[in-house]
Image (tube, coloured by chain):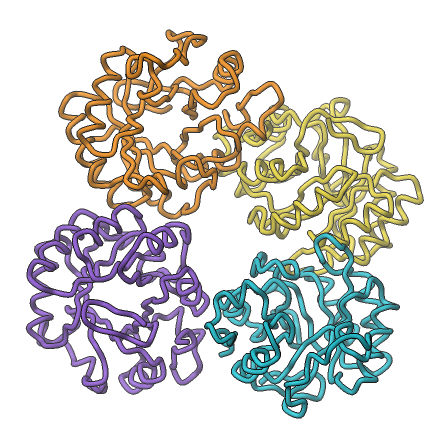
Chain colours: A yellow, B orange, C purple, D cyan
Amino acid sequence: MLTIGDKKFQSRLFLGTGKYPNYDIQKKAVDRSGTEVLTFAVRRMNIFDAEQPDFLEKIDLNKYHFLPNTAGAKNAEEAVRIAKLAHASGLCDMVKVEIIGCSKTLLPDPVETLKATEILLAEGFTVLPYTSDDVVLARKLEELGAHAIMPGASPIGSGQGIINPLNLKFIIEQAQVPVIVDAGIGSPKDAAYAMELGGGWCIIKHSGIWSKRSSPDGRSDEASY
Amino acid sequence: MLTIGDKKFQSRLFLGTGKYPNYDIQKKAVDRSGTEVLTFAVRRMNIFDAEQPDFLEKIDLNKYHFLPNTAGAKNAEEAVRIAKLAHASGLCDMVKVEIIGCSKTLLPDPVETLKATEILLAEGFTVLPYTSDDVVLARKLEELGAHAIMPGASPIGSGQGIINPLNLKFIIEQAQVPVIVDAGIGSPKDAAYAMELGGGWCIIKHSGIWSKRSSPDGRSDEASY
Amino acid sequence: MLTIGDKKFQSRLFLGTGKYPNYDIQKKAVDRSGTEVLTFAVRRMNIFDAEQPDFLEKIDLNKYHFLPNTAGAKNAEEAVRIAKLAHASGLCDMVKVEIIGCSKTLLPDPVETLKATEILLAEGFTVLPYTSDDVVLARKLEELGAHAIMPGASPIGSGQGIINPLNLKFIIEQAQVPVIVDAGIGSPKDAAYAMELGGGWCIIKHSGIWSKRSSPDGRSDEASY
Amino acid sequence: MLTIGDKKFQSRLFLGTGKYPNYDIQKKAVDRSGTEVLTFAVRRMNIFDAEQPDFLEKIDLNKYHFLPNTAGAKNAEEAVRIAKLAHASGLCDMVKVEIIGCSKTLLPDPVETLKATEILLAEGFTVLPYTSDDVVLARKLEELGAHAIMPGASPIGSGQGIINPLNLKFIIEQAQVPVIVDAGIGSPKDAAYAMELGGGWCIIKHSGIWSKRSSPDGRSDEASY
């Protein structure tokens, strides 16, 4: 069983909420996946931007835990501000620190990620930092008190799967907190591989690459064993 | 839906019957996997060798189709003889031609496999040859009339997964009959990968590598989507 | 030292003669590579097709051995006919049997390759068959008497390098004759890898992929250690 | 041509000085490699530890540039102290910051590496930090003023070659300073691959893995094109 902070989960899968053709298909995919945790970017919420539609309108909010992320933040200060906004919305059981350090590759900024993690932990958040697969960096995040570590498998949206299984294995072996493989999971085999490395959990988005391999009705639950 | 000869299957998984700690765990694993096809070596049957225990004693024979293989055969003649023995047992809905050409690597003999396939087809068998991932060889087997093609992912028992996805993709794209990825499937990610390549089916054995990643009660159904 | 039939070579590299921008660059590349063996398709020779230019016009024919190949052949009969044409030209110290079994992937036909190898050996040729990386097939070619085995690294012209190092290793370990890794070598690292696998030799073509990594004056000798 | 700080090099290879059977073989290997830069750990110098033999006793010190590294340092302070010791020896044209953050995997500490790089640059050293393949970290090191970036291919001494070519490619593409692929280069193919990725340079050690593939007289110059 997965324990993050004071919460316990049965499902080994975190699921993204975007990229679905419509909210009915989104609802079906979320239901069938068996996930207990939904992720989304705070900047897509209408609390952040009133022009945004309510992308969770079809979802039964009582059934899930929420892991908003700070996508769009370029430094620790912005990430902290976004996290507080999420907290104000009530849809923030945990927060994923996501600070992109390179607009071309979308890879994370290690120094700002450490900084934001430290600040948010001090403010009482349950913090799950998205990080590169740098092994020593992952340990430093855990030493700060991060509740889980979320190393990327490959660049966000690339669907390239796990490029460096050795580093992920090292991160998983050294960690006392859960390791959730994030970013680049492109197909069920990648999700299965993440779980086999011993972490036991991974996060997927309903990306184009992924949905091509899903069934015609949009379900993306192939990897939700 | 998978169609082989005159049979239709819903499950995308063929399951081995050996390597379980005992027959109760074997039964549970087979049940939970949702498979419709069980595979086994004829030489493990007590029709072949009266000293052998009945390894199917716990299995409800009416619930499954059977794919015995000719393991142990070193040439076409031996494979044909073993296939006929399986047929005589009544547990032979299909036959997997398996002729090992190299005792060290356990890789198949292309020439003898072609020969045995031709003979058994002429005798009315539903024939699924186990073959290397040689693309032109796979096409020749199909041209002979093979009902499915079973290319190896990597050497038997190696658990190395899919070494050459390109060849498997070529074999799957050219084939009009089902392609069932066989041999070397070492973990759920490998099974998922085989299915993603477009073949849609694979065969697994309950090997040591595999069971280590199963749950404590011996179920091996992680890959049985 | 490499011994094929009754010839001995110091260089570990066979070099293609085509795909150069012009014959001056071809000459430079051949000289600098240190190769002792040049390969070419018989169908590019003007003995095969009088309309063809003499692509060896700048090459000092006394300095090299020649390995013409039977590219274009779709079966054993055609390959034998092309090999005899090469022999008639005087530029045929050895012959590479190349019989394509699939026009899309350009992968070789195992059955026709066996047949042509047998015929040409009986006629006294020094025969080097191009083959897939099927391990048992490679052994059968050697058992027929082939003077070297030329397994492909990946499809011809794909530049994908060595996809299945395990099979190449098996082929090299079992062989008593030289193994020359052929087809798909796309860059110096691939050539180095082929040599490290223990075969010690490989064949390269001056393909587009390769030349991009060469120096501006067209030399392609990075891999010719 | 490679330019690091105010120095220019023709050779694309940096060579380690340890792990040779004896100093005569070391001398031969260094000579044949064509390298212009020798690397070594300061802690192996007799200025650091008077008990150490002079491992450069056979080397003509006027022919080479020297890149001592701070191996053994566990934080920035120790690395700075070791670098100053190297400088005092006169054998320090450049310094490689090497701060191990994990004694099991020998992977580098990103935070301490940033800190030591900043301090040594302020003191006027020519600094080449050894780092993980974290892309944003590499950019931060360059922004500090590092004269070259030395990302690891895989863990030190593992000989696993380049595990994540994508990250190395990103690092090379973004860098205005040279990128020298370090650590884990296990064979000539790995060195060739590092060069093909566009960095153009790599560092090798004469490790056991490497020397097995060298010729019997100990030369390790297969990769020194």
Residue A58 visible to an observer of this rendering: no
Q: Residue at x 53, y 33 (%)?
A: B209
Residue at figure coordinates x 40%, y 57% from the top left: C162
Horizontal arrangement in the rendering, residue C210 relative to residue D224 (left or right):
left
Q: Nearer the viewer, residue D202 or B77?
A: B77
Please state the horizontal and vertical placement of residue D215, each as a whole percent of the image. 46, 72
Q: How many marks?
A: 0
Residue located 85% across and 73% down the image: D80
Q: Residue furthest bottom?
A: D62
Q: Quadrant of residue C68?
A: bottom left
Q: Quadrant of residue D58?
A: bottom right
- Confirm whether residue B38 shows in the render: yes
Q: Quick check: C17 above or below B32?
A: below
Q: Is residue B115 above or below residue D174?
A: above
User: Where is residue D54, by image quadrant?
Assistant: bottom right
Q: Nearer the viewer, residue B7 or D224?
A: D224
Q: Residue at x 89, y 44 (%)?
A: A121
Task: State the image coordinates of residue D46 (x, y, percent, origin top left).
Answer: 78, 78
Q: Nearer the viewer, residue D220 or B111?
A: D220
Q: Is residue A63 above or below residue C42?
A: above
Percent position of residue B37, x then y: 38, 19
> Front-most of A34 and B203?
B203
Report x, y in % for residue B188.
Answer: 53, 33
